[in-house]
Image: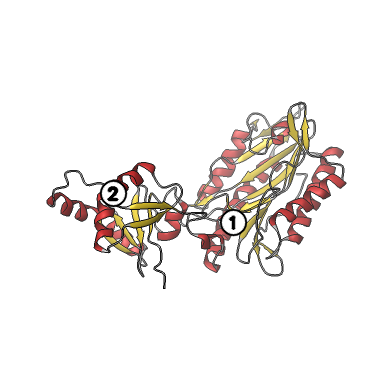
Amino acid sequence: MKNPETLLMVADSEHNADMLYATGLFVPDPFIYLSFGRRPLIVLSDLEIDRARRQAPHCRVVSLGEYQKKLRRSGVKSPGFAHVIRDILREQKIRRVTVPGHFPFGLARDLKKLGIKAKPCAGNFFPKREIKSADEVRKISAALTMAEVGMAEGMQALRLSKIDKRRQLIYRGLPLTSERLRAVIDCAILQACGLAANTIVAGGEQGCDPHERGHGLLRANSPIILDIFPRSQKTGYFGDITRTVVRGHASEPVRKLYDTVFQGQKIALQKVRAGISTSEIHQCVQQFFAQRGYQTGKRNGRMEGFFHGTGHGLGLEIHESPRIGATSNGALRTGQVVTVEPGLYYPGIGGVRLEDVVLVTPTGARNLTRFEKVLEL
């Protein structure tokens, strides 16, 4: 029987999703994770030891300081991570490790000098991260609820806004800008124990750039894209939701654009199920948009139409596998959690995008998003 690979990571778990997934422990500084037996081993500073033993009982927790003391006694003047890793692996008679693709190059070089060969992993370091457990689905749903709280507050601010003679929105006596509305949304999420970063509030022409955060005055009778993707402070899982609204009255071109995206999203949601090709879902939406007369391409040096993917995996990262797009590979699998977010963008009209989060099942998609879809406020 082939021996299992020895897995090695060195990273902080505040920013590294694989480390957080493996340990379930938020640590702001890089630490060592090794898996070569029944229980993974993590090497931490004494500052983190007691907390780690409480919060990561599935791991064997050892002291970085104790290993460094031992190495100094043996003659190593400045023992770093490489020396500690070599010492631990030497005890197990291990000379090869598998590391993630983002493993620090300098550390890999230092390990090689000490006789340890680091082999980069092909593909995802933890492939099972794609398939969410029932507990993970609950955590994503909780983060999604935080996003919906922010969305509700943002829409309420828009509803309460007055429209002046120049079509400017006035909220609580002052002009409503993308920045002010983003602050309303982000503060609501913070109160719900989430962290919002780069929330999109893009009005009018700004909405034609899908990742434009938005800036400046918001105006009535013009589409505003609200894309909110907070992270739970407690679990690290993300939620993600997008709605497009108009404060006032939408023009006929905007109404048609919105209805087309709404129907396109319904088509995609109906196609989602285990076993279906991810690219097929995207192609169906593209074809529907084209049939409605909404072509995708470059005009006057700028892209317009539907020029991003239909969706992406969601979990401990805002964008993870699988991808649902024109060039994506593979098929959906039961237990994956993905977004479904088609959009159309045309200078002179504006942008429309709608996004829900769904759980892939053998027979279809279970929509985890409960928030309403409404165009006019």
Residue 296's x, y, as percent? 78, 39
Query: Dot 1: within a 10 Å radius of its alpha carbon, few (fewer than 14), some, or many (20 or more) residues?
Result: many
Residue 262's x, y, as percent? 78, 50
Question: Which mark sits nearer the N-terminus, 1 or 2?
Answer: 2
* Colouring: secondary structure
Secondary structure of the residue carrying tag 1 is: helix
Query: Dot 2: within a 10 Å radius of its alpha carbon, few (fewer than 14), some, or many (20 or more) residues?
Result: some
Residue 26's x, y, as percent? 39, 54
Q: Is residue 75 above or below residue 43?
A: above
Question: In the figure, residue 133 lies in which quadrant?
Answer: bottom right
Q: Residue drawn 56% across and 59% down?
A: 140
User: Label 1, on which residue?
Assistant: 145
- Indicate which disc residue 82 carries: 2
Residue 237's x, y, as percent? 52, 55
Q: Nearer the viewer, mark 1 or mark 2?
A: 2
Q: Amino acid at mark 2?
A: Ala
The answer to which of 12 and 180 lies nearer the viewer is 12
Q: Residue drawn 55% across and 68% down?
A: 134
The answer to which of 296 and 181 lies nearer the viewer is 296
Q: Residue drawn 45% across and 58% down?
A: 21
The answer to which of 329 and 131 lies nearer the viewer is 329
Secondary structure of the residue carrying tag 2 is: helix
Q: Are marks 1 and 2 in contact (CB under 8 Å)?
A: no
Quarter holding the C terminus is: top right
Q: Amino acid at mark 1?
A: Thr
